[in-house]
Image (cartoon, grey):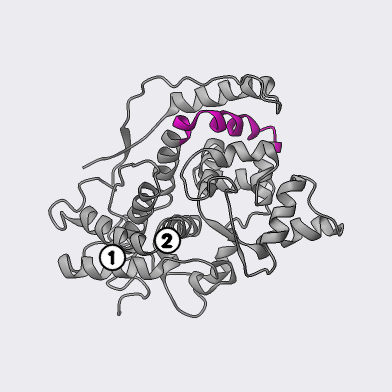
Amino acid sequence: MKLVVFFPLLFLILILTSAVAAYEDFEDDGEEYSSLEVPQLQEFSPFDDFLSYGFYQKRCPDVDAIIHRKLKQWFDQDNTIAASLMRLHFHDCVVRGCDGSILLDYEGSERRAPASKTLRGFEVIDDIKAELEKKCPKTVSCADILTAAAREATVLVGGPYWMVPYGRRDGVDSIAEETKLVPIGIEDITSLIQQYQSLGLNLVDLVVLSGAHTIGRATCGAIQSRLYNYSATGKADPSLSPKYLNFLRRKCRWASDYVDLDATTPKKFDSAYYSNLPKKMGLLSTDSALYTDPRTAPIVKALAYQPDIFRHQFAVSMAKLGNVQVLTDLFEGEIRTNCSCRNPR
């Protein structure tokens, strides 16, 4: 079966051209904003010959139901796990593509790297994998599980649904040093654009996937320099509003504390993340930079005031992310029976 995914070429052209017009009309005092109108688009179009929606139809027909049920159990116990799984999926796909390499647990692996120290959700993937091994032994890859779990996590917090094609194989290599590829919230926009392009993602994907910060938290250690010693000046980052700065300083007594990425509606999947940025309430430096850089600012402003477009495009961009540099050939990777270790040779 041939893979088909969202392919909103007309939509991307529309949002970029209309957003540029919105950029000219934008004022922080509440004046009118240009509106984006999205025409009805064909929802799916051909994309690839290897992944498919029916990949497990005969060998493991209940794969989606099992992933949903197990993840819902974890979510009911701790709803913060949703944002953690979305982040875990992103970390996996940025390094070596979506191959489950972040799940491998041994000395020198991505999972053991300093950049992965605050990642969570490994036990959830292990739990899902164990259940699938009972039902369909040696069939469903850890890479497919993680990709589908990120989708289910998004839906559970009120985000959009998208179809996930299957057929990814698990990578056998995982190198801690390569986690330096993962953005940590201090990069400049040019660097981020180049990195996303290297993954086959574009400017819209960069802004939209940053919108995952509508939920979840960051460690206070990630923003200490913004609060107290921005660019070695001994002062706070001027791109933070004074009121928000005071709030963050009260909240972040210790570097190990956590703070919400979205200061206004942290438990709701919505476009408030974008409307916070003009108010100088972007938690990470990269959040603030999206609003000040002329290449990304028009998209930020368009998404802030048209939440339906954000929801639609988030599904599109997440589907694209899940297809980054996947392994599909029988001679590539393996189907792990335990997500944290390679299969015995």
Image quarter hosting the N terminus: top left
Mark 2 Cα shell of 10 Å, populated few (<14), some (14-19), many (≥20): some
Q: Residue 81: which disc?
A: 2
Question: Residue visible at 44% across and 30% down?
Answer: 308
- As rendered, which of 49 and 195 lies closer to the eye? 195
Residue 138 visible: no
First of labels 1, 2 by sequence position: 2
* Rendered view: 228 above or below 177: above
Residue reaching furthest left?
58
- Residue 5, how many percent across, how many down? 33, 38
| Image marks 1 and 2: residues in contact by CB distance under 8 Å | no
- Quarter of the image with the C terminus in it: bottom left
Separation of marks 1 and 2 at Cα, in angstroms: 14 Å
Of residues 300 and 184, which is closer to you in this image? Answer: 300
Secondary structure at badge 1 equals helix
Residue for badge 1: 128
Q: Quadrant for residue 65, please give it.
A: bottom left
Q: In the rendered structure, which segment of residues is drawn in magenta?
A: 292-310
**Residue shown at 70%/28% (left/top)?**
28
Q: Which disc, if any, is residue 339?
A: none
Q: Which amino acid does label 1 sit on?
A: Ile
- In the rendered view, tell whether residue 310 sits above or below residue 70: above
The location of residue 335, given as percent across then percent down, is 28, 66
Could you say which is closer to the camera, residue 252 or residue 285? Answer: 252
- Asked if residue 15 shows in the view, the reply is yes
Q: Which type of secondary structure does the marked residue at label 2 adopt?
A: helix
On the image, which quarter does residue 73 sit in? bottom left
Residue 141 vertical placement versus 114 (above, below):
above
Q: Residues within 10 Å of mark 1 (few under 14, many from 20)?
A: many
Asked if residue 185 is positioned above or below residue 38 in the image, the reply reads below
Q: Disc 2 residue type?
A: Ile
Magenta-drawn stretch, dominant element (helix, strand or loop): helix
